[in-house]
Amino acid sequence: MNHTLRNDIVNNHSTRMQYLKKYIPFFLLQQVSMTQFKDGKYAIVDMGYVTMALLRYFIEENHFNERSVTYQEVAEFLSELLRNDFSLSLYGEEEKELIDYLFDKIKNDGKPFVMDYFDPVEKKQKTTRVKLLESRLLAGSVVYSVTADAIEFYLETKEVKEESKINIQQLLLEKMIETKNFTGGTEVVRRINSEVNRLRLRKQEVLSLLGVNVFEGAKALEDFQRTGMQWFDREQKAFLRNKELTDQALKKASVAGVSYQASLKEIYELETELKKAMTNHSRLLSDCTELQMRSDEMIRKHKYSRFRNAFDFTDYVEKAKNKNDVSLLKSIVSPLFSPKITKTFYLGNIDELLSYTSQKEEVGEVVLEVDEVSYTFDDEVEEERISQNYEAMIKTLLDMLLVRENFSLAQFNHELELKFFDDIFKNSDYYSFLVHLSQKKEYDLSEIRKHQDTFFDGFLARFLEEARHERYRKLRFSLKLLSDQEGEEEKVTHLITDISGNREFVTTNILFVRV
């Protein structure tokens, strides 16, 4: 095979796979057949169309309106989409069930989409992951936002990636202003804003990757600098040129007749969006400068920490003996037999030697000890909080079972409120605790350390491993819905008072019974 051809195929394969990964979620979702859901009742729904529509909605809200989206807002958007685009008139539980199914598929239950491929350079299978949506906790509520890969995928389904997308859109914007298509120009500027925001997201992802794996982070940084920072000067000039064209159009509209006055509002909207784009572009430049400084610092610290580890010759010789391979010693002795005999001197250094002023005393280089920076990721913070909250609620539940034969959820809530005040009911972990707890009708703590069926079983097993929790290990209890008991109320209503006023939460009542 031709050497150049083979080099292109082998060495560029991994890069191409990384570029293609952002298309994987769409094609996996496109394969989701609605004919298998509810016996094909909603077969008309096209999963690919729903995916593209939802991505466009998130881009609009996250980057044009600069706000995160709650699940309730997603549900309202999908409800309108199903009604208008697929002529589905659904109500109540039926509509909620379909929307939950569609949204769970698109966010993949919170897990990334996975693509496996073979790397011919390293000759091994590799796995790459990509998400369309991300979730986080904001003011006690879960909010969702679109990822940089999802934005890039959405834009590239319509646009050609020749060079900087910002540059391409700037050229299009210039043509639209010249032809007085100000409404179309506003839409182009919004796409420019979306691309700028995607690059800012990408910068944060590169920084996070550097904290986890400095080698992969360095590759991602190089790629970001090549694709994200290469066109800054040209982009800035285009911004200024288009700003001048907009100002000229605005000036003409102010002094022109009625026919031109009709476009005055459109020009104002275009000018506002263009100012926002220029501001965001300046922020991107600052972000990139900050990224360069922080990445240099992280890479320097990583190099320093690696250089401090001494090479263990004894250990290396032992490994050579164990493998019975003397050729391994070549890497130790070969540098000693190949000294660089030929010496060179750059003539341009003569001027520096003549003007060099030597110090009276030699000053030693000061080597400072650098403290290693430990990064704590968001998911680790969330897991620590959930673990602490669950442990407090489990301990309260088991302590009550030790002294009572049975008690209801309302009584359990009262005990929690005495210990933690009504703040416990504003904590989302309380509700997830009840959901996990209700997955099984009976718990035998004497057997749970041997076998776990659910995530909650695993948490209980770890809880019971601690010596201070030994008194709970022989407990056995069951859960009964009081709605199944004749003469009992089905719901538990609890009133919460906070600075925003009175609020209520309602749950099905449960009877906890010690067996």
Image: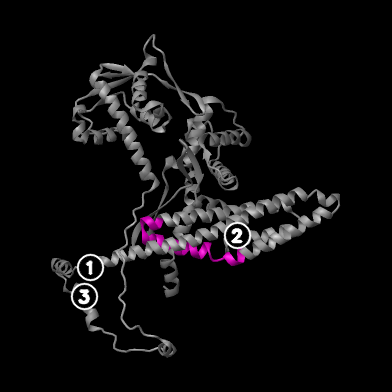
Identity of the amino acid at label 2?
Ile
Q: Is residue 286 left or right of residue 184?
A: left
In the rendered view, would you say 148 is above or below 230?
above
Q: Which residue is mark 3?
A: 332
For the C terminus, the quadrant is top left
Where residue 271 appears, as percent x and y from the top left, is: 70, 53
Does the rendering let one see residue 43?
no
What span is in magenta?
Answer: 209-235
For the residues labelled 1 and 3, the Cα–Cα distance comes to 14 Å
Where residue 319 appears, as percent x and y from the top left, is: 16, 66
Identity of the amino acid at label 3?
Ile
Q: Is residue 216 one of those drawn in magenta?
A: yes
Few, some or many C-alpha atoms within 10 Å of disc 1 (few <14, some 14-19, many ≥20)?
few
Residue displayed at 67% across by 62% down: 240
Q: Magenta region's main secondary structure?
A: helix
Q: Is residue 71 one of those drawn in magenta?
A: no
Identity of the amino acid at label 1?
Ala
Residue displayed at 51% across by 50% down: 150
Q: Compare residues 260 and 302 and report the one nearer the observer.
A: 302
CB contact under 8 Å: marks 1 and 3: no
Q: Compare residues 41 and 462 and report the one nearer the observer.
A: 462
Residue closest to the far right: 257
Does the rendering let one see residue 379?
yes
Q: Give SS at disc 2.
A: helix
Q: Give SS at disc 1.
A: loop
In the rendered view, would you say 368 is above or below 477?
below
Q: Which residue is mark 2?
A: 166
For the N terminus, the quadrant is bottom left
Q: Is residue 266 left or right of residue 6?
A: right
Of the numbered discs in the image, which one, if any, rests on residue 310?
Answer: 1
